[in-house]
């Protein structure tokens, strides 16, 4: 059964129960609307996973930026020094670095 699940082909049908499943699978696969809907759901799932990863990366990056700004403050770095460090560490523009400092500077 495991071989059939891994590779759904007639070659992996080893008993009557798997043969019954195989015929049902073939019947479903042959229906055009099922194939289209399956591909749509597969594509949507892929998109959702990518969006989730991107959101996670962005949230993690913001936390690190905030921590760097807090650390710079604790070591009495100026806002300009902090902006410079942000630009260097995160390869961001001067404007973006300034916005982060304004947002997170306490």
Image (spheres, helix red, strand yellow):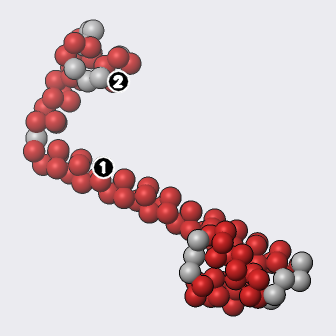
Relative to 40, residue 73 above or below = below
Residue 70's label in the rendered image is none
**x then y, percent, for residue 14:** 27, 9
- Most foreground residue, 26 or 21: 26
Single out the residue that lies furthest toward the top. Answer: 14
Relative to 27, residue 54 above or below = below
Q: Is residue 103 left or right of residue 13?
A: right
**x then y, percent, for residue 76:** 89, 83
Crowd rating for badge 1 (residues with CA inside 10 Å; few <14, some 14–19, many 20+): few
> Which of marks 2 and 1 precedes in the sequence?
2
Looking at the rendered structure, the number of numbered marks drawn on it comes to 2
Q: CA distance from mark 1 to mark 2?
A: 18 Å
**x then y, percent, for residue 16:** 23, 11
What residue appears at the point 74 percent right and 88 percent down from the top-left corner?
Answer: 80
Secondary structure of residue under mark 2: helix
Image quadrant in which the N terminus is located: top left
Q: Quadrant of residue 8?
A: top left
Q: Taking the image as drawn, is residue 66 in sight?
A: no
Q: Which residue is mark 1?
A: 42
Q: Which residue is mark 2?
A: 6
Relative to 105, residue 5 above or below = above
What residue appears at the point 63 percent right and 82 percent down from the top-left corner?
Answer: 97
Q: Taking the image as drawn, is residue 25 in sight?
A: yes
**x then y, percent, for residue 29:** 16, 36
Q: Is residue 58 left or right of residue 69?
A: left
Image quadrant in which the C terminus is located: bottom right
Crowd rating for badge 2 (residues with CA inside 10 Å; few <14, some 14–19, many 20+): few
Tell me whether the residue at label 1 lies in contact with that at label 2, contact meaning CB atoms closer than 8 angstroms: no
């Amino acid at each position: 059964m495991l071989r059939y699940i891994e590779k759904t082909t007639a070659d992996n049908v080893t008993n009557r129960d798997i043969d019954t499943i195989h015929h049902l699978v073939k019947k479903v696969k042959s229906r055009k609307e099922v194939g289209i809907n399956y591909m749509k759901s597969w594509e949507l799932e892929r998109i959702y996973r990518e969006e989730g990863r991107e959101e996670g990366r962005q949230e993690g990056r913001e936390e690190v930026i905030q921590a760097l700004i807090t650390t710079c403050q604790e070591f009495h770095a100026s806002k300009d020094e902090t902006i410079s460090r942000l630009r260097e560490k995160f390869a961001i523009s001067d404007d973006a670095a300034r916005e982060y400092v304004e947002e997170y500077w306490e």
